[in-house]
Amino acid sequence: MNTVFRFLLVGGALALVYALLAALATSQLPWPKAISAAAAWIACIPLGFWCHRHFTFTGSARRPFALGLYALTQVLGMGIGAGTSFLFASGRFWPDLMVHLCASALAAVASYVINRKLTFPEGGAP
């Protein structure tokens, strides 16, 4: 199975989990929307790393600091999620769900490129 297809499968599942958590957080928690969205993103990082390491990028070289690199990559995604939440979240579940799904899609493009090149390089260190 192609790496991009596996990334879309894993990333799509993670995006759905994030969007649901973020929509619940921004519509139910008394926190600022950007903080709620960032907290939901942070909650997804360990699961995302494990899924990408063991399913998406199976032929990649082992990196001693892969989790740290992955977490740093997710800072960009968190910024996208928090920024779109700050700008567009309304505090209503269904509209916020769409906002967070769009943010996840944008972050996924950046995440794939960075993770394929740096975090999980093919065959060896870059």
Image (tube, helix red, strand yellow):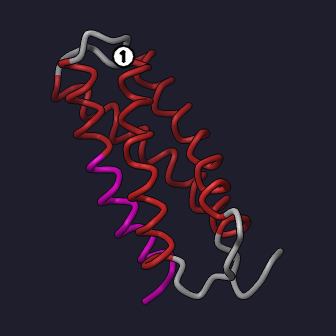
Q: Is residue 87 above or below residue 39?
A: above
Q: For residue 102, what is the image quadrant?
A: top left
- Residue at x-position 51% and y-position 23%: 83
Could you say where residue 125 lies in the image, as x and y percent from the top left?
A: 80, 77
The residue stretch that appears in magenta: 1-17
The local secondary structure at tag 1 comes to helix
Which is more toward the observer, 60 or 67? 67
> Where does label 1 land, which residue?
33
Could you say where residue 35 lies in the image, as x and y percent from the top left?
A: 42, 20
Look at label 1 and name its amino acid: Lys
Q: Is residue 24 above or below residue 34?
A: below
- Residue at x-position 52% and y-position 46%: 107
Quarter of the picture holding the N terminus: bottom left
Which is more toward the observer, 45 or 3? 45
Could you say where residue 25 lies in the image, as x and y percent from the top left?
A: 25, 25
Q: Is residue 80 above or below residue 67?
A: above
Whether residue 59 is in magenta: the answer is no
Residue reaching furthest to the right: 126
Q: Is residue 53 left or right of residue 22?
A: right
Could you say where residue 22 lies in the image, as x and y percent from the top left?
A: 30, 32
Q: For residue 117, what is the image quadrant?
A: bottom right
Whether residue 14 is in magenta: the answer is yes
Q: For residue 122, what is the image quadrant?
A: bottom right
Magenta stretch, overall SS:
helix
